[in-house]
Image (cartoon, rainbow, N blue to C red):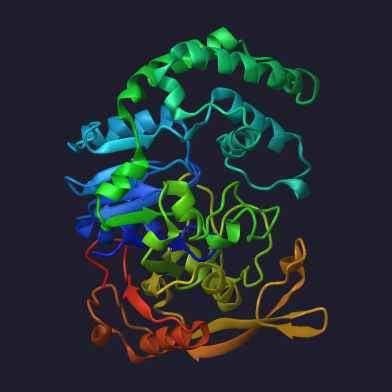
Amino acid sequence: MANIVVFGSQWGDEGKGKIVDMLAEDAKAIVRFQGGNNAGHTLVVDGKECILHLIPSGVLHPGKQCLIGNGVVLDPFVFCEELDKLAAKGLDVSAKRMMISKKTHVIMPYHRLIDSAREAAKSEAGKIGTTGRGIGPCYEDKMNRCGIRAGDFADLDLLKKKIGKALEEKNVLFKHLYDAEPMDAEAVFNEVKPVAERLAAYLGDVSSAIQEADGSVLFEGAQGTHLDIDHGTYPFVTSSNTVTANAASGAGCSPRDLERIIAIVKAYTTRVGGGPFPTELDDADGEYMQQQGHEFGATTGRKRRCGWLDLVVLKESVRLNGPTELAITKLDVLSGMKELKLCTSYEYKGEQIAYPPQEENGMAYVTPVYESMPGWDEDITGARSWDDLPENAVNYLRRIEEITGVKVGIVSVGPDRAQTF
């Protein structure tokens, strides 16, 4: 198996977890390279659902090494909860197969408090739609060179000092800006200490583990390209780089090690939280997609906004990530729709454009240009090859290939592991 990067090509929730789970069968190691527990991957195997937030989706395959890269921000409490839930299902979650990079930054209780306090202080129009899990504030401390890293869990004296130092500044914010109670450094340390002692056994050199896997690594991204901190619909974005290029820096390897790049594309478009969404549908078609696709966030439970497939967004993802193939998910959700629309360009400031505008919030002022295609009525959840798909479904996929210039290599027609070819 070649090293594979799996990334989301839209605004997240494309079905990455399922595709990672499928591809993990042939990998030696699966590594998460960015994001935190603001991501949720829902897997269905033999009709049983499993939701993961931090641990790589390959954990359901016995014997696979699961790695947390340095580009992730790790909530140690959530990680321990996931370990316990997976262990209760009979899965091996020992340190023999799980590893956290010593360079991974750790989400602390004060990060979560800052996150929720900031969002609460904003006007309704200014809300980003953050999950409030402390992701952004943790990345801020990382960039400010005052963060706590997983390797600090092996040195409790250092951990205690760093917590105290961090709260000198943050307590000023809590008291004078957010009208919140200051946090006691000793109390925070005592809260974190048990999980720090537990996770110390999981610390390791992820870069070496990737090297030792000898070209059989699956790199698992979180969120989607258009939530990227640099290339997404800023400021309605996440706090990390979600594009493929970050797989190397976020895991600890050379970019030359990234060989096969798979763009996960939902057959329509969804978005959670605030931000522009040109093809959003506030009508019966949008409601149909939402209901048929069970579009609720795996992490937050929030209802996802739904709309037609935006190929302008997808072409930008192709340009930024260089995928070798597309994996189309949830194609079955479109069954029963008489007419399908594809957004092929935008009208913006009197011109027709093929890529998203670069100005901040420019996407809020575009008008989508559509082309229509006939839908299909057939139930395709039992399809196991291209030959099993109705002609109009094949035509839909072929049109996506034509406009993006990238072949469709994987098609998913239902939530179960087996409903993929």
- Taking 116 as reference, is 203 left or right? left
In this view, 393 is above or below 228: below
Query: Residue 261 in the image: x percent, y percent?
Result: 40, 67
Determine the residue positioned at 66% across, 29% down.
114
Instruction: Residue 320: tell me if it is visible.
Output: yes
The quadrant of the picture occupied by the C terminus is: bottom left
Q: How many marks?
A: 0
- Taking 46 as reference, is 282 left or right? right
Determine the residue positioned at 65% across, 66% down.
277
Q: Quadrant of residue 161?
A: top right
Determine the residue positioned at 23% across, 31% down.
94
In this view, 167 is above or below 230: above
Determine the residue positioned at 32% across, 36% down.
99
Query: Residue 361 in the image: x percent, y percent?
Result: 75, 62
Query: Residue 354 in the image: x percent, y percent?
Result: 66, 82
Q: Residue furthest top?
A: 186
Of residues 30 and 78, the one drawn nearer to the viewer in this rendering:
30
